[in-house]
Amino acid sequence: MKTLLLVIAFFGLNFASSFGQSGELPLRSGDRITISIGAIHDNEVAQIRAVYTISDSGTINLLHIGEVRAVGQKPSNHQKVIEQTYIEREIYTRPNVLVSIDGGGGSDGPMRTVMVTGVTKPGSVPFKQDMTLSRAIMTAGGPTSFGSMKKVNLVRAGRPLTIQNLSTGTGNPSVDVKVQPDDQIIVPE
């Protein structure tokens, strides 16, 4: 029995750590990221500050330094890489870079989504930072007339994560958990 509990604990911790404690999502090809920079000449701030789409090869192209690998990095790490590259190449002495994932999508790249079934408008809904289970369900039109909010299933990375009882209302972060891109939410009948 102890062995079984250790195995469950290991996989649970490993699963949780794969998504990080900070809630930051790793960047991927097609993501649109906003890069802001400070502590450099004003005329160059405007040339660098923009929305960039990560290429199929996993890079973005920045002023003075060219291609910088972005895929697989979290935004906070990517901004440090950009800062260090500017410093190491002696272009800027103390640049201050901020990288954030742009919710956009559209023709410049794919939008991150959450799949919701058992709702009046089943399918993908656009992912938004801090989106919860109930918000995703409501974005998809709410549960069908036969849908039960008592046993909402959350599937992450192909593995069932939790069954949540959302029938008592929202606002409790231990029940109405935050979703991540590519999650599947199933509202059973």
Image (cartoon, rainbow, N blue to C red):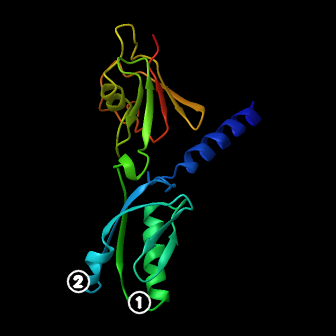
Please report the residue visible at 46 percent of the width from the left and 42 percent of the height from the top.
Answer: 181
Label 1 element class: loop
Disc 2: CA contacts within 10 A as few (<14), some (14-19) or many (>=20): few
Does residue 105 appear in this view? Answer: no
* Residue 185 - label: none
Amino acid at circle 2: Asp
In the image, residue 10 sits, relative to residue 5, either above or below, namely: below
Q: Quadrant of residue 176?
A: top left
Quadrant location of the N terminus in the rendered image: top right
**What residue sits 27% from the left and 78% below the top?**
45
> Label 1 sits on what residue type?
Ile
User: Crowdedness of circle 1 by 10 Å Cα count: few (<14), some, many (20+)?
Assistant: few
Q: Identify the residue shown where x is 40% and y is 35%.
A: 177
Q: Residue furthest left?
A: 42
Q: Residue 136: image x %, image y %?
A: 36, 31
Residue at 48% across / 81% down in the picture? Answer: 85
| Marking on residue 91 | 1
Counting residues from the N terminus, which is met first, the one under dot 2 or under dot 1?
A: 2
For numbered disc 2, what is the local secondary structure?
helix
Position in image of residue 183 (x %, y %)? 49, 35
Horizontal side, residue 27 vs residue 12: left or right: left
Q: In this view, does 105 lie above or below 184?
A: below
Left or right: where 46 falls relative to 187: left
* Residue nearest the viewer, comparing 53 with 129: 53
Does residue 18 appear in this view?
yes
Percent x, y for residue 70?
Answer: 51, 64
Q: How far apart are marks 2 and 1 (CA)?
A: 14 Å
Q: Name the residue under label 2.
A: 42
